[in-house]
Image: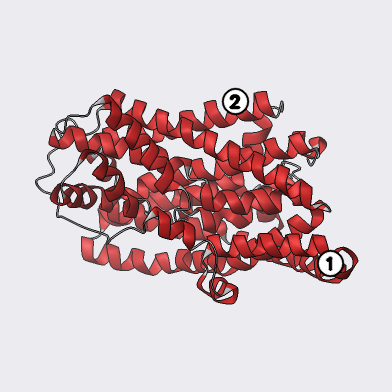
Amino acid sequence: MAWWFKIKLWKRVFAGLVLGVVFGLVVAQTMDAAHAEALLSKVKIIGDVFIRLIRMIVVPLVFFTLVAGIYAMGDPKKLGTIGVKAFVLYLLTTFFANLLGLLMGALFQPGKGVDLGGAAPKTLGAATSIGDRLMSIIPENPFAALVQGDMLAVIFFALLLGVGLLMARKAGEPAGRFFEAVSEGVLMMTHIIMELAPFGVFALIAYVAGTKGVATFTAILSLTLAVYIGCALHMAIVYGGMVRFLARLPVVDFFRGILDAMMVAYSTSSSSATLPVTIRTAEENLGVKKSVAGSVLPLGATVNMDGTSLYLGIVALFTAQAFGYHLEPQHYFLIALTAALVSIGTAGVPSASLFLLSIVLQVFNVSPEHTALVIGFIFPFDRLLDMMRTVTNVTGDSAVAVTVAKWEGEIDEEVYRARPAA
């Protein structure tokens, strides 16, 4: 089996993805629907185990690496500069994602001529208001937040704890070394779990391909093209431009270094589930030091949802085109602003964006019935669109981490320019 581990992880994951698509389609074509879904459901268990293992590690990974990353800065003032720079970059990339989403929706006209009469109305419940979301950042009980996996609350508590250890100086050194040691142990756990990625990806993609089929893409071809091309352009132009012109680093090395994270993001459709491998690729392939990777990436996995913001803009125009709503210039501005605001802190799990769609559609007074129809139409194949949105989010996290690390002198450029070992 030594030959297997010599193959780069992203290549193994890609092979699992391709074989999963082929297997799923073959099963769907050679068996009746009921038996095919039964078989694919059993195969999917492997993928569910993989996702469960990743989710098991996410909260301790975020908590310990964030505390250790802040402690590694050695100066509370440095946290302020890194945090402000990262947050500003996240906001800027979201702004460009909004513009690009509206542009894609206007160019591709994905809702033009679409008949939603056959779509079963579907609602996903009321979305949390922006005010409640901001208030929930401060945990009433930090231990409960850790248990429940409330990532914004976990990040807030970890930030304060890390700053507290820095301010305690010598008295905080034993605890600081403890968090550094545990964070290393947790990262080693992610190495073990990620070796299961090719098999988990195979199982998850086989189920999606076998139950949804190629017809899913053809039924919503314009919407699919708008989302995929929009996300690809955003990654190439905005993230590539950030790395090239702000960080002044080679773009090819950047994308080559994060291939593992991109493949896992595409297959899991979860920014949170991909976080362990995002941190690993940033540190090992891109040379980002722990002080930046451990603080910027967990923050990005929670607040940086460019793919979601871009997608919400496209779906808003899709809705207007499908039902004949007339949009004034101010509506485009309000759609962009609302999509940006509600995308911040979106749960990093599959199809979480649909919970936010109703808020964006309220901008031009879409009726509850039409909102339910749009959600019902999109929901069956949203996972396929969510896969690309997640790749965009994860790529953006890494691009910001690299840029901030370069500005702060916290990057090993020899590691960045070297070809990834695995």
Callout 2: 10 Å neighbours few (<14), some, many (20+)?
A: some
- Report the front residue among 221 and 70: 70
Q: Is residue 229 visible?
A: no
Residue 156 occupies quadrant? bottom right
Is 358 drawn above or below residue 408 in the view shown? below
Which amino acid, by three-letter code, is at mark 2?
A: Gly
Which amino acid, by three-letter code, is at mark 1?
A: Arg
Query: Which residue, given by chain and number where applicable, does mark 1 sit on?
Result: 177
Callout 1: 10 Å neighbours few (<14), some, many (20+)?
A: some
Residue 241, which numbered label?
2
- Rendered-image quadrant of the N terminus: bottom right
x and y percent of residue 133 in the render? 44, 58
The local secondary structure at tag 2 comes to helix
248 lies left or right of 16: right
Is 189 drawn above or below residue 230 in the view shown? below
> What residue sits 56% from the left and 40% below the top?
90
Is 45 drawn above or below residue 368 in the view shown? below
